[in-house]
Image (tube, helix red, strand yellow):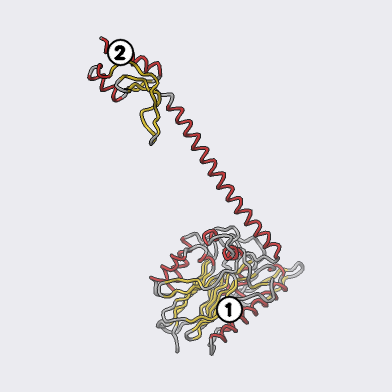
């Protein structure tokens, strides 16, 4: 069965970064996103090297299994090329890149994935993530240490467990094949989208925007509207849809601009060339960067630190709750004491009485009580005074309340 395809790619530097370390590619059969790491001096170089190497395998394959093998070999070759580049240019030590890629072969797709860029499948109105993030935080989620909601704001959410780079000569790459159906829409993106825009919002765009190019641009705009703290790259692939003319392969991000590489020596300057990339002089990166731990001890320290963070958070909540309860109790005590400094004249069992407190009640709790009960009968008062007593008469003090009672007594006896 021959299937048609529509695809689009879009990339943006975001609102915080000074350069775009992402790369994306939408070809004839191959589609990928690479998110570089290593700061200003290496992230863009890493994603460009990997993308330019992997897109060499963009051609037809007899089966999806053959494409799967080709993807794995291409990613390993890119990993070796990154290691060679770091060996020749030590200033790039520590650079690396994520890669999430797929090749369409008739009714199947072959997929390859390493890092925390993601591949989603949008089918029958539902968006499903088909890759698993290779991050420290995802390990915490998988082992039940934290929830998915806590992972969204975890301070170590950018720590990568697996990437292409100069750390591991044979990194573990996830590869597999899946069936694809007419109407399927595949989304490949960097964490500049998935880490900023909620999945419901992504699904809404994919549902209501038919054009892959327009949908990709809308998703990039959604990230920008949310602050875009990182580069954002989106590739959308539609299966079994009509093609308008011939679609040319599209490369976006750092891999799209071939530039001359220059390296300065202490005694002379020489020009070297690397395809489609430029090595920048080291300087601090803007915004958070990915980082790949190199030792098990570091991971153990991260786990211990996370456990300490959870304990501190629980202790903080407990202390806050205790302080809140103490504050409420103190406020209640002080408030009650204030009410007991107030007096008023009213009726008690048909007689005029002086009450201590205020007229209001706090639910079932009375905020006043009889302080002094007199022998003055309320019925013996004039109609006006009787109404006043029944409605209660405020007094500024106990002495003022006693004065009001004496006045009522004189009036009733007169």
6 relative to 349, above or below: below
159 relative to 178, above or below: above
Secondary structure under badge 1? strand
Residue assigned mark 2: 409
Mark 2: few, some, or many residues within 10 Å (few <14, many ≥20)? some
Secondary structure under badge 2? helix
Quarter assignment of residue 340? top left
Residue 79 on image: x %, y %: 65, 76
Residue 218 on image: x %, y %: 44, 68
Q: Which mark is residue 175?
A: 1
Contact? badges 2 and 1 (CB < 8 Å): no
Give the residue at the far top of this rendering: 414
Left or right of 238? Residue 303 is right
**Marks 2/1: CA distance?**
99 Å
Image point (60%, 84%), residue name: 69
350 relative to 46, above or below: above
Give the residue at the far front of this rendering: 349
Residue 274 on image: x %, y %: 65, 76
Q: Nearer the viewer, residue 182 or 288?
A: 182
């Amino acid at each position: 069965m021959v299937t048609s395809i529509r695809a689009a790619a879009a990339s943006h530097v975001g609102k915080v970064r000074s350069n775009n370390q992402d790369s994306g590619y939408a070809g004839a059969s191959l589609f990928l996103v690479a998110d570089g790491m290593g700061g200003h001096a290496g992230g863009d170089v890493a994603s460009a090297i990997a993308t330019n190497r992997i897109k060499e395998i963009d051609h037809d394959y007899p089966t999806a299994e053959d494409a799967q093998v080709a993807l794995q070999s291409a990613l390993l070759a890119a990993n070796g090329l990154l290691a060679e580049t770091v060996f020749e240019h030590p200033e790039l030590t520590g650079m690396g890149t994520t890669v999430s890629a797929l090749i369409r072969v008739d009714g199947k797709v072959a997929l390859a994935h390493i890092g925390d860029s993601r591949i989603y499948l949008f089918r029958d109105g539902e968006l499903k993530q088909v890759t698993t993030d290779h991050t420290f935080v995802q390990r915490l989620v998988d082992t039940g240490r934290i929830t998915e909601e806590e992972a969204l704001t975890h301070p170590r959410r950018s720590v990568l467990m697996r990437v292409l780079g100069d750390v591991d000569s044979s990194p573990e790459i996830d590869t597999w094949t899946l069936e694809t159906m007419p109407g399927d829409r595949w989304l490949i993106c960097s964490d500049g989208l998935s880490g900023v825009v909620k999945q419901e919002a992504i699904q809404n765009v994919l549902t209501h925007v038919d054009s892959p190019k327009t949908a990709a641009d809308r998703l990039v705009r959604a990230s920008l509207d949310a602050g875009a703290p990182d580069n954002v790259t989106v590739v959308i692939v539609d299966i079994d849809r009509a093609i308008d003319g011939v679609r040319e392969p599209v490369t976006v991000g750092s891999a799209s601009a071939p530039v001359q590489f220059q390296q300065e020596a202490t005694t002379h300057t020489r020009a070297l060339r690397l395809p489609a990339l430029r090595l920048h002089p080291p300087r601090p990166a803007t915004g958070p960067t990915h980082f790949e731990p190199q030792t098990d001890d570091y991971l153990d320290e991260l786990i211990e630190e996370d456990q300490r963070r959870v304990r501190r958070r629980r202790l903080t909540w407990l202390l806050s709750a205790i302080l809140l309860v103490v504050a409420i109790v103190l406020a209640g005590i002080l408030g009650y004491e204030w009410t007991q400094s107030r007096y008023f004249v009213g009726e008690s069992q048909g007689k005029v009485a002086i009450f201590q407190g205020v007229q209001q009640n706090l639910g079932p709790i009375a905020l006043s009580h009889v302080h002094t009960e007199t022998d003055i009968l309320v019925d013996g008062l004039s109609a006006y005074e009787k109404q006043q007593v029944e409605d209660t008469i405020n007094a500024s003090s106990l002495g003022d309340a006693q004065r009001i009672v004496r006045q009522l007594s004189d009036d009733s006896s007169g």
